[in-house]
């Protein structure tokens, strides 16, 4: 093929234009901020995670992107606080119990027995200026930026036999975490700790007669309804846990105000979506899977009273913890639970 002068010039112009576009694309790529976000959840919330990533990308016109890591993919969940402080990841989504040995408020903010009885109550506490300031201070001292909270859902009792009161549990062995076990000990209720993967065998073989682990959907997912069907609302802790978002200070401070606002909005929606997913899951368990009952109000209040020993153990860890516990006590009294 013979090129005319015009054709050669057109070809050269096209090449120059392509080079310019490539240069613009490279610059745009370089200007895109990418943040490593690590959750403790697995694949079960992938649709929620995609919505979160897409929301950040869309709101920022592609200038802010989330690199998303599921539980265990990059960092172990109990190493989140240290990892985000060091900058191994930029933002973590976990729960305070994972890092309670490093950060004094961890256990309290994750959820102590009797701390709150409704999501609205928990939100009221964490959104108060006093508690927000305590968390901001604690996490700043740990080399992180506190971004906010998410809220879990049901955390109640599953047993083989029906339960009408705490007295019914005195002859049964219940799986419980250490803090809950301390509270149940006040009522002479025997407890033992088993990890989640051992609950089915423990329940089916009689090693335990019941478990305090989660909500109906968690028990169904573990197939525990094949071994026990009596679900008792204890009104001891709802939501049964709270979730915390932390950022690396250098990564956070390097963001523009616009990017910070986009992230804060998207993270809050992400947290709300997870809470709603948990609620929908519990409500969606097929009718007849469990038989539901509720502890008498007097027993629920007695659990909160008995939890005061656990609360004061946490208060003794630091003056900041004492202030946090004082806020819990004031709230419980205002709600009529103390």
Image (cartoon, grey):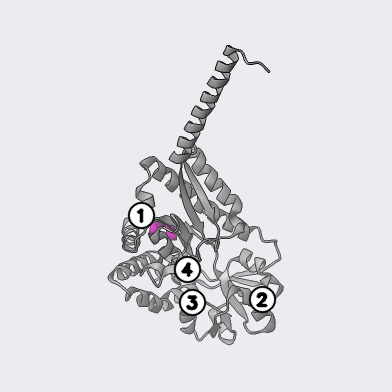
Depth-wise, is mark 2 or mark 4 nearer the camera? 4
Alpha carbon separation for disc pair 2 and 4: 25 Å
Q: Mark 4 highlights which residue?
A: 78
Alpha carbon separation for disc pair 1 and 3: 35 Å
Q: Is residue 208 left or right of residue 316?
A: right
Q: Looking at the image, is mark 1 or mark 3 earlier in the sequence?
A: 3
In this orientation, does residue 111 appear?
Answer: no
Q: Is residue 179 magenta?
A: no
Q: Residues within 10 Å of mark 2 (few under 14, many from 20)?
A: some
Q: Which residues are magenta?
A: 122-126
Q: Position of residue 142 (x, y in %)?
A: 34, 64
Q: Secondary structure at mark 3?
A: helix
Q: Looking at the image, is mark 2 or mark 3 earlier in the sequence?
A: 3
Q: Residues within 10 Å of mark 3 (few under 14, many from 20)?
A: some
Quarter location, residue 278: bottom right
Q: Residues within 10 Å of mark 1 (few under 14, many from 20)?
A: some
Q: Secondary structure at mark 4?
A: helix
Residue occupying the point 63% across, 16% down: 3
Image mark for residue 200: 2
Image mark for residue 249: 1
Is the Cβ of the residue at disc 2 closer than 8 Å to that at disc 4? no
Q: Looking at the image, is mark 2 or mark 4 earlier in the sequence?
A: 4
Residue occupying the point 69% across, 83% down: 205
Q: Mark 3 highlights which residue?
A: 180
Alpha carbon separation for disc pair 4 and 3: 20 Å
């Amino acid at each position: 093929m013979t090129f005319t002068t015009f054709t050669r010039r057109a070809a050269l112009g096209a090449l120059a234009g392509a080079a310019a576009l490539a240069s613009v694309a490279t610059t745009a790529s370089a200007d895109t901020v990418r943040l490593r976000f690590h959750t403790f959840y697995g694949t079960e919330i992938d649709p929620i995670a995609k919505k979160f990533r897409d929301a950040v990308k869309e709101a920022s016109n592609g200038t802010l992107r989330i690199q998303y890591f599921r539980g265990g993919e990059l960092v172990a969940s109990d190493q989140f606080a240290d990892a985000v402080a060091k900058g191994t990841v930029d933002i973590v989504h976990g729960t305070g119990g994972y890092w309670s040995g490093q950060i004094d408020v961890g256990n309290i903010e994750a959820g102590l027995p009797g701390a709150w009885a409704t999501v609205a109550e928990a939100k009221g506490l964490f959104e108060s200026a006093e508690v927000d300031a305590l968390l901001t201070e604690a996490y700043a001292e740990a080399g992180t930026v506190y971004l906010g909270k998410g809220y879990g859902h049901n955390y109640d009792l599953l047993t083989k036999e029906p339960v009408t009161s705490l007295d019914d549990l005195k002859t049964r062995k219940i799986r419980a975490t250490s803090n809950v076990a301390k509270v149940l000990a006040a009522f002479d209720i025997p407890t033992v700790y088993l990890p989640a993967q051992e609950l089915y065998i423990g329940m089916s073989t009689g090693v335990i007669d019941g478990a305090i682990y989660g909500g109906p959907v968690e028990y169904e997912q573990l197939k525990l309804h094949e071994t026990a069907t009596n679900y008792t609302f204890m009104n001891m802790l709802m939501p049964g846990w709270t979730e915390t978002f932390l950022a690396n200070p250098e990564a956070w401070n390097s963001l523009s105000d616009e990017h910070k606002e986009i992230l804060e909005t998207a993270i809050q929606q992400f947290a709300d979506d997870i809470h709603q997913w948990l609620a929908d899951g519990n409500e969606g368990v097929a009718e007849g899977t469990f038989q539901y009952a509720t502890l008498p109000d007097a027993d629920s209040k007695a659990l909160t009273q008995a939890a005061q020993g656990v609360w004061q153990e946490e208060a003794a860890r630091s003056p900041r913890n004492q202030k946090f516990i004082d806020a819990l006590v004031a709230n419980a009294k205002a709600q009529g639970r103390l």
